[in-house]
Image (cartoon, helix red, strand yellow):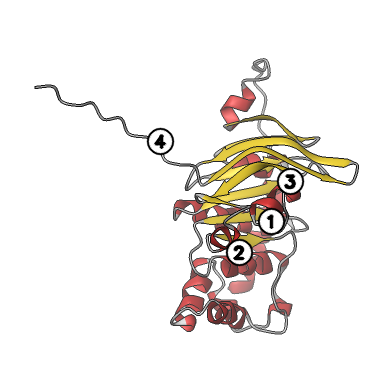
């Protein structure tokens, strides 16, 4: 008796883009962008200012229409199923969209109520704990640091548990400590099964966070892959034995951490 051989199909990517093009009058911003983002992964779209990163995010989040090509998010076509796409995503822009007059908890409760979710107070408390903001939850957001505001902004974007999150240059303008706080929040998103597409112009940010990286240059993806795959593009480096010295980041975080410990004594 012959038993039929079954082959499992690879899971559909959370984001699939083919031949995406966009122009503003005579300026061609996107010139045929192709990319796939696996579910539950962190994908970094890396490029300099003006490379077209934000334009890609706006098209994927249905804020902008492409001139040509196709894009699917969570299995939905961004052009013909925009409402389904918007129900599957959350977008955090380059600047924190939080109400500084309200407290952190009030911001979260407000969004939960706007989404018509049950138990908005419980949702707010859970997210405050998850993003290490519980002690600051009853303070007005105007008193928050840049890193705290950005963490609150990301927490607000997770209300309703969207499967796909877009982060457009999430650490722009943050100090080193704030950047690391946001990095940790992004890692926790992916660990919870959320697909994250982030745009950045910071090389170290893509290196620290991303499972896969695509470099967007002059409207095209010129290379994509894992960090190791991208490293293999260049010739092997010569091995030299040198004394490892602390980086400026090591010095900064050590001093700031020591200062905070003294304040708590």
Tell me the quarter of the image containing the C terminus: bottom right
Judge depth for marks 4 and 1 and give the one in front.
4
Q: CA distance from mark 3 to mark 2?
A: 19 Å
Q: Please provide percent x and percent y for residue 81.
A: 57, 56
Q: Which residue is mark 1?
A: 170
Q: Residues within 10 Å of mark 4 (few under 14, many from 20)?
A: few
Mark 3 sits on what residue? 53
Of residue 16 and residue 243, the one placed in the foreground of this image is 16
Tell me the CA gap for discs 2 and 1.
9 Å
Q: What residue sits 62% from the left and 69% below the top?
A: 152
Q: Is residue 1 or residue 46 the one in the foreground?
A: 1
Note whether residue 209 is visible.
no
Q: Is residue 256 left or right of residue 114?
A: right
Q: Disc 3 versus disc 4: distance between alpha carbons? A: 27 Å
Question: What is the x, y in percent for residue 239?
Answer: 64, 17
N-terminal-most mark, 3 or 2: 3
User: Which-is-in-front pick, marks 4 and 2?
Assistant: 4
Of the numbered discs 3 and 4, the one sitting upstream in the chain is 4
Percent coordinates x, y for residue 178 in the rendering: 68, 59
Q: Residues within 10 Å of mark 2 (few under 14, many from 20)?
A: many
Q: Is residue 205 visible?
A: yes
Label 3 or label 1, whichever comes before in sequence order: 3
Is 248 on the left or on the right of 125, as rendered? right
Which residue in the protein does label 2 denote? 154
Q: Secondary structure at mark 1?
A: loop
Question: Between disc 4 and disc 1, whose residue precedes?
Answer: 4
């Amino acid at each position: 008796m012959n038993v039929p051989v079954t082959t499992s199909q690879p899971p559909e990517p959370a984001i699939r883009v083919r031949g995406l093009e966009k122009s503003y009058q005579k300026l061609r911003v996107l010139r045929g962008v192709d990319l796939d983002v696996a579910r539950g992964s962190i994908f970094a779209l890396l490029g300099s200012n003006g490379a077209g990163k934000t334009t890609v995010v706006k098209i994927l989040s249905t804020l902008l229409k492409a001139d040509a090509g196709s894009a699917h998010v969570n299995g939905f076509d961004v052009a013909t199923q925009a409402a389904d796409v918007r129900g599957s995503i959350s977008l955090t822009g380059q600047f924190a969209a939080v109400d500084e007059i309200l407290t952190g908890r009030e911001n979260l409760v407000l969004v939960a109520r706007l989404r018509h979710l049950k138990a908005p107070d419980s949702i707010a408390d859970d997210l405050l704990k998850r993003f290490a903001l519980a002690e600051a939850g009853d303070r007005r957001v105007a008193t928050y640091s840049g890193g705290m505001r950005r963490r609150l902004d990301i927490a607000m974007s997770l209300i309703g548990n969207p499967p796909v999150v877009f982060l457009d240059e999430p650490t722009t303008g943050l100090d080193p400590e704030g950047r690391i706080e946001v990095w940790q929040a992004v890692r926790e998103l992916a660990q919870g099964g959320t697909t994250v597409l982030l745009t950045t112009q910071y090389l170290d940010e893509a290196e620290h966070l991303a499972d896969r990286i695509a470099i967007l240059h002059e409207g095209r993806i010129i290379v994509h892959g894992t960090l190791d795959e991208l490293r293999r593009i260049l010739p092997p480096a010569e091995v030299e034995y040198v004394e490892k010295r602390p980086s400026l980041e090591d010095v900064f975080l050590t001093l700031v951490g020591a200062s905070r410990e003294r304040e708590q004594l």
